[in-house]
Image (spheres, helix red, strand yellow):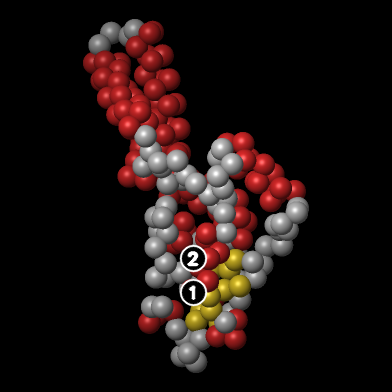
Amino acid sequence: MCKDQVAEDGKLDAKTLHMVRGKYYDLSKFVHPGGDRVLRQSLGTDVTASVASHHFTDAPYVAMAKFEVNAKNVKGSIEEVHYSFEPDGFFETLKRRIVEQVGQGVPGVRRPVSNAYKFKVAASIVTWLITWVYCCTRPFCWPVAITCGALRTVLTGIGHESIHGRIPELFHLFDMMLMLPSEMWHREHCLE
């Protein structure tokens, strides 16, 4: 925990914590596999819905357990978001069925990034750059302009996948393709 998070009475300020399933967590030392962006953006909020909808296993709950803070040691509060994530409820049932179909029955296993995917990303970036430069420096050509637009759509999708942890270094590709600050988009997409 950081010094500036501790109030004079020794309690942690709720604005510096996260709430999941009604419990407080000090995730300031937690290393999130998808980067710290989501942790920074969600300080002082109930992230139960985000955790439940973005993770297919109990791994986050297990990892967060050591960061739990007793509510008696918290100054202020975080308003709980009252969504239901009951084990036999609609959302959890749907999530299990998706994992069975898409995840080939192996819950929580994210397929590693294949060389074919890396090639697709590299080829898309290079081809888009070539078509973009062509469109900016040569006479107008419909096939090149359409290819450039289609590749921009592909690269936006790749940038979106990077937000969710697939080749996270490409996160700002999303900024470039949408001409929108990804920090703002990420907050709206993942947290609100």
- Does 70 sit above or below residue 138? below
Residue at (52%, 60%) from the top-left corner? 60
> Residue 159: percent from the left, percent from the top?
41, 37
> Residue 26: percent from the left, percent from the top?
48, 73
- Specify whether 92 is left or right of 33: right
Residue at (64%, 66%) from the top-left corner? 21
> Residue 147: percent from the left, percent from the top?
38, 15
Badge 2 marks a residue whose secondary structure is helix
**The N terminus lies in quadrant:** bottom left
Given residues 172 and 32, the one toward you in this image is 32
Q: Residues within 10 Å of mark 2 (few under 14, many from 20)?
A: few
- The kind of residue on which mark 1 rests is Lys
> Residue 140: percent from the left, percent from the top?
33, 9
Instruction: List the residue tagged with mark 2.
Output: 63
- Does 10 sit above or below residue 143? below
- Specify whether 60 is left or right of 28: right
- The kind of residue on which mark 2 rests is Ala
In the image, farthest residue toward the right: 89
Badge 1 marks a residue whose secondary structure is helix
Q: How many marks?
A: 2
Mark number, residue 54 = none
Residue at (37%, 19%) from the top-left corner? 148
Residue at (50%, 46%) from the top-left corner? 109
Instruction: List the residue tagged with mark 1.
Output: 66
Question: Is residue 121 visible from the viewing direction of this image?
Answer: no
